Amino acid sequence: MSITKKQISAARVLVVGDVMLDRYWYGAVDRISPEAPVPVVRVTREEERNGGAANVAYNVVTLGAQASLLTVVGDDEASHKLEALVAKTGIRTHFGRDADLKTTVKLRVIGRQQQLLRLDFENTPKSEILASQTATFESLLPLHDAVLFSDYGKGGLAHVSDMIARARTEGKPILIDPKGSDYSRYQYANVITPNRAELQQVIGTWDNEDELQTKAQQLREQLHLDAVLLTRSEEGMTLFDAQGQLHVSAQAREVFDVTGAGDTVIATMAALVAAGMTLRDALPLANRAGGLVVGKFGTATVSYEELFA
């Protein structure tokens, strides 16, 4: 089934989850510090990008669909910077603010084309702020065609089970990028998209494809999911659903940077499902989008034109 640009542009995805500001400091490394055996980076350029769920929403709009972003942030410089960045892309922002919260910032120091250091600034939001987000979620739900939960384990999705129940009542497709070892909170979603390491945390390791199939299907039935989509980087991806399994091979290309490829995959799936595609039909396109994005540096996105070229 093919999908037109018009169908995509009418598709509305509600992205809920943990956002972060990705900061990059680029510099020249000319010497080693006299104080300790570490390189001295003379910072020459700074860059800021949408991170976490904000990058997922950015991937949705780059593809040509519409996105709203519901999240909780601090009331700090980083949160206002991030909200301005997000709003500039055409994403509708619904930022709950908690003055005691530090907006998550990931600062990467890059010298000689490689990451030398990453500094993380973060803490966990209070549950009353999260509870107020649930009310906003309920008001936004009818205006969207699909819901995407982007869990980065930062505490912003403490009420995810309630939100899933509400979205199901409204008959909205629910896609989840999961975190942690307890997937019971994702019960009744349509699809979860763990990578290999994330799935192993939950079902343990597997020695062969048969064992993987058995364990993945058991997990799917246990959690009452329509599907489990396993992203496997250079091995492509596999969808486990009631019909069995569907595998697509990775698009062989120069792998430059896998940062954010999972964001692109789930954002593409969500946009296509919101536009009326089935998970099975959307799978090869999401795989192609993931393949395109690893050829770009940092968290990147894919346009409708690139995807359907």
Image (tube, rainbow, N blue to C red):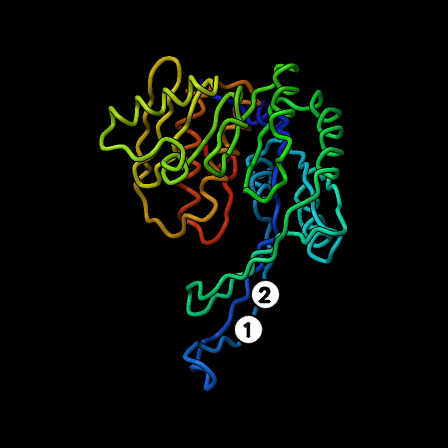
Residue 246 falls in which quadrant of the image? Answer: top left
The location of residue 65, given as percent across then percent down, is 60, 31
Does residue 240 sit above or below 179 in this rendering?
A: above
Identify the amino acid type marked 1. Answer: Val
Image quadrant where one finds the N terminus: top left
Percent of width and height locating residue 267: 53, 34
Q: Quadrant of the C terminus?
A: top left
* Residue farthest to the bottom, as pictured: 34
User: Can you tell which quarter of the image residue 170 is in?
Assistant: top right
250 relative position to 63: left or right: left
Q: How many C-alpha atoms fall within 10 Å of the one at disc 1: few (<14), some, or many (≥20)?
A: some
Q: Which residue position holds label 2?
A: 46
Residue 131, x across and y down, in percent: 73, 33
Query: What's the CA distance linking mark 2 and mark 1?
Result: 8 Å
Residue at screen point 50% across, 34% down: 177
Q: Which mark is residue 43?
A: 1
On screen, residue 8 versus residue 290, left or right, reads right
